[in-house]
Image (cartoon, rainbow, N blue to C red):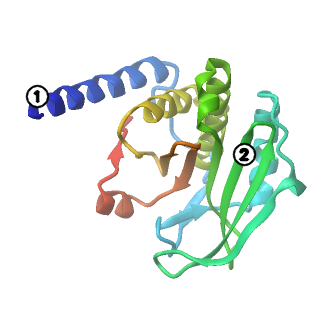
Amino acid sequence: MKHKAFVWGLSALILTAAILLCSCQDHPTLKPVNTTTEESENSFGARCTFTLKEFTEASADAFADLGISLKDDGWQTINVGLIDDNGVKYSSYYQHAGEITFTAAVEYDSQKVMNIGCGCETKKLEAPAFRKKLLKSAAVTAQTIGGYAADSTMFFEAVFSWLSECDNDALYYGNSLLIKSVDQKTTVLMTAPCSEEVREKNRYRKISD
């Protein structure tokens, strides 16, 4: 078991390095070009600087390039007035965009976005073309939330691809937490602004430049 764990750890390290070398060669720094996150009292210690409507408008063209129509008036309410672990009230929403379902958590008082997810039925990921579309959708979400340039999506697509196949449930990069939630029926790839303090407390693996 110890040998297996060591091999897995080494493989994970090699894979991470490969992702960074292959995907960041055109992005030697990959720093945010816009300030899109700010401190918050929520359980992640951070939130987006924009509302759900503003996220939808900012990412519309990138999603359209993937054949996905995300609409301002397409968001449907799941729950209102939920309370997170830090006592911050928030609401949850969803929007079906073809075979991909987008989810969102939004602070109740500030109306600022806490996280955005892209999900589907897990069995659909068996089709390579659809899997790539989901990964690209998650990458656009991460790029928009993190405030990175449009050409950074290749990097985030590679990270989500690796995350979807490994044992880690979350990876931290820049100012965001990239999260995977999988069960027998559904797979969700999510991006949430996250403070360094929360990352350290929960020991999320960090991808460095």
Contact, CB < 8 Å: mark 1 with mark 2?
no
Most extreme residue toward the bottom, as rendered?
Answer: 87
The amino acid type, in three-letter code, at marker 2 is Thr
User: Where is residue 202 drawn, in percent x and y?
Assistant: 32, 60
What residue sits 79% from the left and 47% below the top?
Answer: 96
Q: Quadrant of residue 118?
A: top right
Q: Is residue 49 left or right of residue 194?
A: right
Label ID, residue 165: none
Front position in the image: 103 or 148: 103
Q: Name the residue under label 1.
A: 3
Badge 1 element: helix
User: Where is residue 58 drawn, in percent x and y?
Assistant: 77, 46
The amino acid type, in three-letter code, at marker 1 is His
Is the N terminus in the top left, top right, bottom left or bottom right quadrant? top left
Q: Which of marks 1 and 2 is nearer the N terminus?
A: 1
Badge 2 element: strand
**Picture layout, residue 181 above or below residue 135:** below
Q: Is residue 35 left or right of residue 173?
A: right
Q: Is residue 118 left or right of residue 68?
A: left
User: Which class describes the residues within 10 Å of circle 2: few (<14), some (14-19), or many (20+)?
Assistant: some
User: Where is residue 153 drawn, in percent x and y?
Assistant: 60, 30
Most extreme residue toward the front, as rendered?
Answer: 184
What residue sits 61% from the left and 46% below the top?
Answer: 147
Front position in the image: 161 or 172: 161
Front position in the image: 164 or 113: 164
**Picture layout, residue 166 above or below residue 36:** above
Q: Name the residue under label 2.
A: 101
How many numbered marks appear?
A: 2
Q: Quadrant of residue 124?
A: top right
Is the C terminus in the top left, top right, bottom left or bottom right quadrant? top left
